[in-house]
Image (cartoon, rainbow, N blue to C red):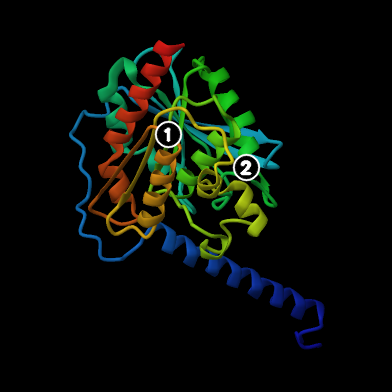
Amino acid sequence: MASAGPTTPRGLALRRAALVALALFGIATVAALVLRSRPDSDLPPVTVAAGATDGTVVRRYDLRSASAGRRLVQTVVLPPGDLRGRPLLVLLHARAQDPTSLAQAPLRAALARLGHRAPVVLLPADDGGSYWHDRDSGAWGSYVLYEAIPTAIRRLGLDGSRMAIGGISMGGAGAFALARAAPGRFCAVGGHSAAVWTSASAADPGAYDDAEDFDRNEPLGPVRRGEDRPYGVPLWLDAGTDDRFLPADRTFARALRARGEDVSFSTGPGGHEPRYWQRHMGRYLDFYAGALADCAARR
């Protein structure tokens, strides 16, 4: 019997399998670094009172995306009451984060508390590391703007003139990039521990395809250079005091203010971690609901 040498079919197959395993290990390692700035967080678990989520519903449906070239599960979190004419909040997840992890009690309790002002929340899926822009792995920005959002509006009977977009980490950077790509479409934009870098060389591996992709899609550079039209809507940025993205997020907020943008910036205890975002989910939803209500009054 022939041995599984490096040039035999079996040897080549084994070598490919080893390379795939190594690549997956690398992705998992980077994802762990993105989702956790430090392993010794002192933040306690977030607790939600019994009954605080009553009336909220989590639903899922499949969307066959031509832009991304695959089937993607959409998660929507529905507030209590009639959905017709409600506004839409698009909330983009972090790198390697399951979007359904955002549809937990802190978000649902915040929606229930908002009552008739609560938006429907859309949590799109991706490939785990899209950074929510059109790139070699798929047209992820086009998928969100022209497939995921219109489908949610049509299925649920929402008010497509009142939309906000925000996100966690990778999703925060993506929210600003998508709002820049679709000026005037969103009533508010938010980045929660937004994964912003000041240069292509500083970016995590895989965040962008190359330096050109970085220049086209990262949110900070165009604002600093004065290349883009103003957002012209309420903006939100926040990050924990132990978050490695805090310096760049603060730089981004300052650059936006220098352009005359209406930016709320805050920080507080915590790192780049789910407990930090869960602790502030109520504030995030208050911001989006207020901006969406003001948007309705203006229109």
Residue occupied by mark 2: 140
Residue at 31%, 22% in the rendered image? 55
Place residue 253 in its image quadrant.
Answer: top left
* Residue 109 visible at all: yes
Residue 43 in the image: above or below residue 164: below
Residue at 32%, 45% in the rendered image? 277
Image coordinates of residue 224 in percent, x first then y, are 51, 47
Image coordinates of residue 132 in percent, x first then y, are 57, 44
Label annotation for residue 260: 1
Place residue 66 in its image quadrant.
Answer: top right
Image coordinates of residue 244 in percent, x first then y, are 37, 60
Name the image quarter holding the N terminus.
bottom right
Mark 2–mark 1 Cα distance, whole angstroms, equals 29 Å
Residue 230 in the image: above or below residue 273: above
Residue 205 in the image: above or below residue 232: below
Residue sitting nearer the eye, 203 or 53: 203
Residue at 34%, 54% in the rendered image? 273
Residue sitting nearer the eye, 39 or 105: 39
Q: In the rendered structure, which disc, 2 or 1, sits on the residue that comes first in sequence?
A: 2
Residue flagged by tag 2: what amino acid is it?
A: Trp
Q: Is residue 29 left or right of residue 68?
A: left
Residue at 29%, 49% in the rendered image? 276
Residue 27 in the image: above or below residue 15: above
Image coordinates of residue 125 in percent, x first then y, are 54, 41
